[in-house]
Image (cartoon, rainbow, N blue to C red):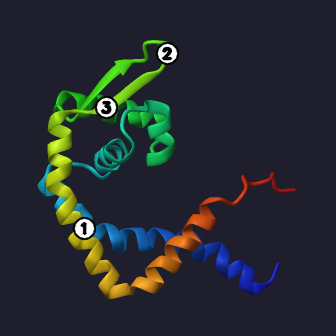
Amino acid sequence: MSQQTSLHQHRLPQHLLSAREAVMSYFRPMLNSFNLTEQQWRIMRLLDDRGDMEAGVIAGLACILPPSLTGILVRMEKTGLIHRSKDTVDTRRLIISLSAKGSELTRQILPVSARYYEQIEQHFGADKLEQLLTLLTELEQIPDPQPAD
């Protein structure tokens, strides 16, 4: 293993985490002002963008472990942000939908969120941001790891 490879092994995860924190420093205070967690906002955005979804699909798309998602969804339903219902065909499937209250809150947050995205783009540059998003999309598609020998 080369020294360069060794450096990348330590740097890639750290850089990804640091970059996430830099971006979330824009959004976390805003979400807190609306009494939302990052996970709740990811769920609300998915439901707003894609409509009703099965809980397992939300877990995968929102990068939330299924056991954690269960608690988050229970709390979101108690606060009136979502509705949970059993699938009429397969009652083992839990279907999640955004409530009217959740939709209204999403409509309030989206313009604020968009202004923060604009600030990030201004600081980073539109071309570089597009390139970064392309590279991250490619990185997300890497194959599952093989067992190490």
Residue drawn 31% across the image and 31% down it: 97
How far apart are the two marked residues, 2 and 1, measured between alpha carbons?
37 Å
N-terminal of the two: label 1 or label 3? 3
Task: Decide if residue 77 is on the left or right side of residue 128.
Answer: left
Q: Is residue 94 above or below residue 9?
A: above
Quadrant housing residue 82 = top left
- Say which residue label 3 marks: 97
Quadrant housing residue 50 = top left
Closer-to-camera residue (28/45): 45
Closer-to-camera residue (135/148): 135
On the rendered image, what quadrant is the C terminus found in? bottom right
Asked which secondary structure carries label 1, the reply is helix
Q: Is residue 59 above or below residue 33?
A: above
Name the residue furthest right.
149
Crowd rating for badge 1 (residues with CA inside 10 Å; few <14, some 14–19, many 20+): few
Residue 114, numbered circle: 1
How far apart are the two marked residues, 1 and 3, measured between alpha carbons?
23 Å
Q: Is residue 102 above or below residue 86?
A: below
- Assess whether mark 2 and mark 3 are in contact (beta carbons under 8 angstroms): no
N-terminal of the two: label 3 or label 2? 2
Crowd rating for badge 2 (residues with CA inside 10 Å; few <14, some 14–19, many 20+): few
Task: Decide if residue 79 is on the left or right side of residue 144.
Answer: left
- Say which residue label 2 marks: 92
- Identified by mark 3, the residue type is Ser
Q: Nearer the viewer, mark 3 or mark 2?
A: 3
Asked which secondary structure carries label 2, the reply is loop
- Identified by mark 2, the residue type is Arg
